[in-house]
Amino acid sequence: MSSVRVLVGTRKGAFILTSDGKRKDWQVSGPHFAGWEIYHMKGSPVDPNRIYASQTNAWFGQLLQCSVDGGNTWEQPGVKPEDATPSWPPAKSNRFLYDVSAETGKPLTTHQWYDGTQHPWEFKRVWHLEPSLTDAETVYAGVEDAALFRSTDGGKNWHELAGLRGHGTGPKWQPGAGGMCLHTIILDPADPNRIYIAISAAGAFRTDDGGATWKPINKGLVSNMIPDPNAEIGHCVHHVAMNPARPNVLFMQKHWDVMRSDDAGENWREVSGNLPTDFGFVIDVHAHEPETLYVVPITSDSLHYPPEGKLRVYRSRTGGNEWEPLAKGLPQQDCYVNVLRDAMAVDSLDECGVYFGTTGGQVYASSDAGDNWQPIVRDLPGVLSVEVQTLA
Amino acid sequence: MSSVRVVLPYHLRNLAHVGTEVALDVAEPVTMRRLLDALEAAYPMLLGTIREYETGQRRAFLRFFVCEEDWSNEPLDKELPGAVVEGKEPLLVIGAIAGG
C-alpha cells in the first residue's frame, strides 16, 4: 500500500510526518537538528530515501545534511572517516563560494541594497534544495545572496552555475524583506537542459542549456512598487509552480498578483480573478489536474496574515481567474498565521493530497484535493517549508 | 606537541558527537590558528561553523575566551597562554549573543 512522508522544515528543527495512504493517522518524528533553522528538505525522485536538508543558524552558518534511510539518520556529506583521502578533509558540504574563476566564473559584482545603493554579494544560507530528476547524487541549491549551486557528488562539494549571477542584471537585483534569496528551482522533466528559477526580488529566469546561460522571463509582470512597473528585472516573485505533465505551463504567486504562463515563461498574464486579495506566498498545482491550482491569500504586504483572521485555501479548477474558498477544517476566526513560500506541497496519490504549514506551527493536510482539511500536527515551531513524498 | 582543551557550545558538540570538552594535540608554538586547524582536522563536520571559509576569520556571532580574557580579536598567530598550552585552562568557544 502506498504511504506518504511529509518533510517539514521549521525555525527550530526538522520534522518528518508519515502516514499510510489513507492519510488519517500520522506519526511525527523529530525534531531533527533541534534548535537549528531548517529552511528546506527534499527527497530524491530517483532514490526517495535519500533526503537533503538545509540546516542553518546565525551563529554557526550553513550546514548541509543528507539521509539515505528516509530521514532516520543523517550526516554531513563527506565527513565520514572512510571519506578520508590524502588531502583530507576532501569535502566541504557547507562551502558555497561564488565562482569568480577565470574559466567558469563571473565577476562578483554588486547588487542593489534596500536603500538603492550597491552592496557586495555575501553568502548567507541555502533556501531551497532541488534533487535531480535522474541522478540521486546531483542536487541544486538556491542560496541567499541569490545564486544557484550544483553538487554532483551527493552534496559533498558545490559549484556555482555562475551564468545566472553573471547575467549582467545583477546590479538591479535587490533583497525582499526575507533577503535576496533564490527560492524556487524547477527542473523540466521533458528537457534536462531547461531549468526555471526565481529570485526575490529580481524575477524569474530560465536556462535552456543546462545552466550555462540564462534569460529573464518576466514579460507581463507588473509591479507598481518599482520605478518601471514593467521592468525586465526587479519583480518580487514569491513562488512558481508547475505540473510535470505540462512543463511549459507555469503558475506564479508574485508579491501581488497570481500569474500564469503558457509558453515556458515567455509571457505572463494575471489570473488573480475573484481572489479576496492576490498577495500571498505559496502556490501549487494538483498532481493530476494541471488546471487545478491552490493559493493561500494573505491580507497585504503590510499584514502578513489571512484576511479577517480566517485561514482559507483558494482553489481554481480553471487554471486561474475563478477561485473558490476552501475552509472546512481550517480556523475561521482569530487566525493570524502566515504561510511561507515553500510551505505547500501535494502528494500524487489517486485522490490528490494537499499540505501546507504555517508560521504558527500547524501543518494542515487534505486527502481530498482541498475539500476537507485536518491539522496533522499543531504545535511545531514556525514552519518554513513543506515537501511531500508519495512512497510505493 | 601539547594537549589542548576546547569547550564547545551546545550545537557544535552535537555536530561533532562529543561532550562538553575535547582534547587536541597541537604542535608548538600553540596559536589560535593551529588550535582551530587541529579542531577542524579532528572534527571536519565543524568546518565553516567557527571560521568563515572565504576569509578564515571567526564567525561574527562567536567569541573566544581564554584564561578569563577575550581573545576574539587577538591575532590568530599570537601564541596562547601557557595555561592553555599545558592543558590547565581550556579555550572557550561561545555564542556572542543569546539566542531563543
Image (tube, rainbow, N blue to C red):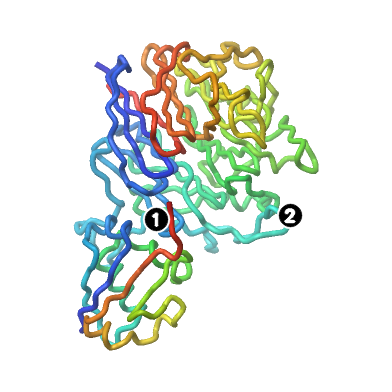
Whether residue A392 can be seen here: yes
Considering every residue shown, the one lying at the far right of the view is: A227
Where is residue A336, by image quadrant? top right
Residue A40 position within the rendered picture, expressed as x and y whole percent measured from the top left: 43, 40
Q: Nearer the viewer, residue A333 or A361?
A: A333
Where is residue B30, by image quadrant? bottom left
Quadrant location of the N terminus of chain A? top left
Q: Amino acid at mark 1?
A: Asn
Residue A242 position within the rendered picture, expressed as x and y whole percent measured from the top left: 52, 26
Quadrant location of the C terminus of chain A? top left
Q: Closer to us: mark 2 or mark 1?
A: 2
Task: For mark 1, name the chain.
Answer: A
Q: Which mark is residue A94?
A: 1
State the CA–CA distance, disc 2 to disc 1: 31 Å
Q: Which residue is mark 2?
A: A116
Q: Residue at x 24, y 78 (%)?
A: B4
Task: For mark 2, name the chain.
Answer: A
Q: Residue at x 41, y 28 (%)?
A: A363
Q: Amino acid at mark 2?
A: Gly
Q: Nearer the viewer, residue A168 or A251?
A: A251
Q: Residue at x 32, y 87 (%)?
A: B81
Circle nearer the N terminus (2, 1): 1
- SS at mark 2 in the image: loop
Q: Residues within 10 Å of mark 2 (few under 14, many from 20)?
A: few
Q: Nearer the viewer, residue A388 or A87?
A: A388
Q: Is residue A364 above or below residue A219?
A: above
